[in-house]
Image (spheres, helix red, strand yellow):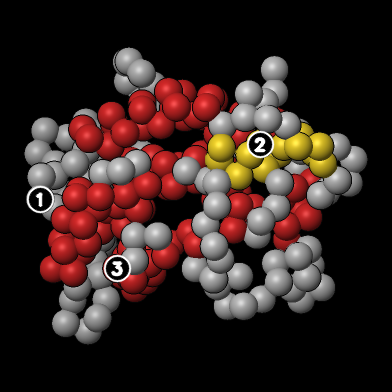
Amino acid sequence: MSAGEDPASFDGKNYIGAVSAASSYTSYSEYVTNTALALVALSRADKPVPAALFQAAIDQSADQWPASGSPAWDDIDSGGLMLTALSHVNDSRKTATVTNIESWMDQARVDGEGWSNQVTTSDPSSNVNTTAWVAPGMDRSDETSQAVDAQSWLVSQQNTDGSFTAGPDLTEPINLMMATTQAIPPLLGLSSYDNTGTTYQPHEIRVISGQPRVCQEIGVTGVG
């Protein structure tokens, strides 16, 4: 979409249809990052969000960023991405989930900089990849001052050749490429990561039945 192409008909493939057709809960609950990206992709394409996808996002987030106790594993990056993804959804059932994720993001924040990729370290340091994903999510959560600080910190991390380094031990070309491609969107604008080429509007959850894009819209009180 950012390149001006139609995701429903690109190189003979319907990527929107493939994501929408995976209507079972287990299809969406493989990995939290994938779930968040699927939410963003469907929203950007102005397509219905399957109820199973939304429920997977809520359940995965409960395991990954619980209200109390320890997270399933340190994954601050995906927390920021999930905040961005859930900002696209008009459903009050996301409120507690968003609050819990924000709390974990706060624990990983390095004042005046960005976010560490772990909450369990005793000496946290900001990470380019993590900060690039968390800053837009926190901006969507009305923590704009933190996000702007993170933008400034990201600028300070750029190498003389224009690339970005995720950390002192991550200097292989693939590491530089990933850090750089993740840093660019929030530097272009805190909302550019998920709405380049589109007009951002939160989406209501809808139940999809039968073929992709044949759907029945439900209210924000939604499913079950």
Residue type at mark 2 is: Ile
Instruction: Name the residue tied to disc 2.
Output: 205
Q: Quadrant of the C terminus?
A: top right
User: Cα distance, mark 1 to mark 3?
Assistant: 16 Å
Residue at 25% in and 50% down:
144
Question: Would you say residue 16 is visible in this rendering?
Answer: yes
Query: Where does residue 148 sit, x and y in percent of width and height?
Result: 21, 57
Query: Pointers 2 and 1 in contact (CB under 8 A)?
Result: no
Q: Quick one: SS at disc 2?
A: strand
Residue at 32% in and 20% down:
70
Query: Where does residue 190 sit, x and y in percent of width and height?
Result: 34, 60
Q: Quadrant of the N terminus?
A: bottom right
Residue type at mark 1 is: Gly
Query: Where does residue 155 sit, x and y in percent of width and height?
Result: 18, 69
In the picture as drawn, the residue positioned furthest to the right comes out as 210
Residue at 10% in and 50% down:
112
Label 1: how many Cα within 10 Å (few below 14, some 14–19, many 20+): some
Residue type at mark 3 is: Leu
Callout in the foreground (2, 1): 2
Residue at 21% in and 32% down:
107
Instruction: Name the residue tied to disc 3.
Output: 187
Residue 46 location, quadrant? bottom right
Residue 112 disc label: 1
Query: Pointers 1 and 3 in contact (CB under 8 A)?
Result: no
Question: Would you say residue 27 is visible in this rendering?
Answer: no
User: Cα distance, mark 2 to mark 3?
Assistant: 30 Å
Label 3: how many Cα within 10 Å (few below 14, some 14–19, many 20+): many
Q: Quick one: SS at disc 1?
A: loop
Is 221 above or below relative to 162? above
Q: Quick one: SS at disc 3?
A: helix
